Amino acid sequence: MTLERRIGITLSGGGVRAAAFHIGVLQRLAEECCLERVAFLSTVSGGSIVTALIYRLGSDKWPSSVTFLHDVLPEARRHLTETNLEWEMGLKGLVHPYSALRRRANLLGAALRSAWGIDGRLDQVPREPRWVINATTYETGKNWRFMPQRMGDYDVGYVLEPRLPVAEATAASAAFPVFIGPYVLPTHEYSWVRYRDGGLRETDPLTMPFRSLHLWDGGLYDNLGLEAVYKMDTEQFREGIDFLIVSDGGAALKRTGPRPRLSLVTRSIDITTSQVRALRSRSIVGKFQRERNVGIYAALGTSPRKILTDAMVGGKVSADLLARCAPDEVVETAAAVGTRLRRLTIHEFEHLRRHGWDTANCTLSGYCPDLFEFTRWAG
């Protein structure tokens, strides 16, 4: 069936693990001819990387459902299983040793251009659907947003219609501290403004107090990308969205013992971001549980049995439904893939794609039964 609603989609961070999981979720939507109904995209880190790839493979625009299934999906599989972005960054670093030490995120942007051909410009991205690429501003601690209309945050100011490569914006969204480090944006290359009276129409010129801005992974602020589409205080979607799909390919926080000093830093970041993610996910999941048929939260690592059992509020899940889903081993293998930008094996990609598809299939049919039916995996 075709969903006659304006769809909002958030694609979380989580490296290439999240990217392949999101591919599976989008495949399930494409099978229902839903990609044409997408009005808004909010992406973070790995979600931004896979969306940039999807746009590139779709001739620099959001693809139709048929184009996604026939053209984009096979090519996305090839790119994610044949290219190691970490190695590509390393090769760029040999040519630009200063950047290898101080601007590794900028090297990621260069790697996305050379390895995947992501060479479009932000101001040239089609305005429909609206695509927001999320990062975090080190100088202000706010959510930085890249859009065709503007880039910036409400504290530091904005650049209108930024002539910035999409690959650079994507790299900033995935600039995780320690392993990659911040994306460095030279402020003197742009004209800055501040919106007047909290609106989005009239602006005043702004003198930027910083010579450069340091943009970190959007997951440090909001790994789900929810803030751009959902207001937690009112529990309302942003205007223009009737149905919201939250695809969460992030890793669960695991138990661990004592670690080396560098690992303590990353562990501290993981604890903080995990807490923020939990607060945001509880809010949106609560809304979906109270209001059926308005959206889904599809989370990596959740088994089909748990999804269907929770959706039926304690009812017994039929063996026939579970037999149509991948076994729990697929879920476990998918969830065990690390948060990296390395090349995925075919085995890893297919398990992540199937897990994303199953998660979307079970969640859509369980929480939106008036709109979606449980269907069989077709490969």
Image (spheres, rainbow, N blue to C red):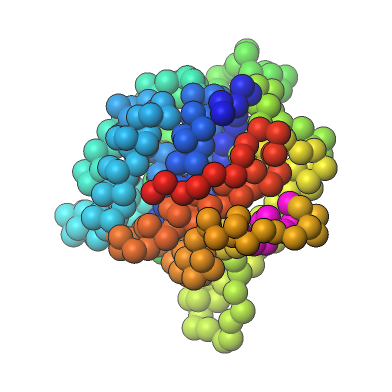
| Residue lying at 45% horizontally and 41% vertically, measured from the top left | 27
Label the magenta part by its dominant secondary structure: helix
Residue 307 lies within the magenta run: yes
Query: Residue 346: percent from the left, percent from the top?
Result: 30, 60
Against 168, residue 2 (above or below) is above
Against 326, residue 44 (above or below) is above
Residue 333 lies within the magenta run: no
Point out the stretch of residues depicted in magenta.
304-311
Extreme left residue here?
95
Q: Kindly tell me whether residue 123 is visible in this rendering.
A: no
Give the camera-side residue of 13 and 208: 13
Extreme bottom residue here?
258
Q: Is residue 331 left or right of residue 373?
A: left
Q: The N terminus is located in which quarter?
A: top right
Q: Kindly tell me whether residue 325 is visible in this rendering.
A: yes
| Residue lying at 26% horizontally and 49% vertically, measured from the top left | 78
Against 141, residue 349 (above or below) is below
| Residue lying at 60% horizontally and 57% vertically, measured from the top left | 320
Give the camera-side residue of 266 and 30: 30
Give the camera-side residue of 84 and 344: 344
Give the camera-side residue of 77 and 153: 77
| Residue lying at 51% horizontally and 80% vertically, measured from the top left | 261
Q: Is residue 203 left or right of residue 180?
A: right
Q: How many marks?
A: 0
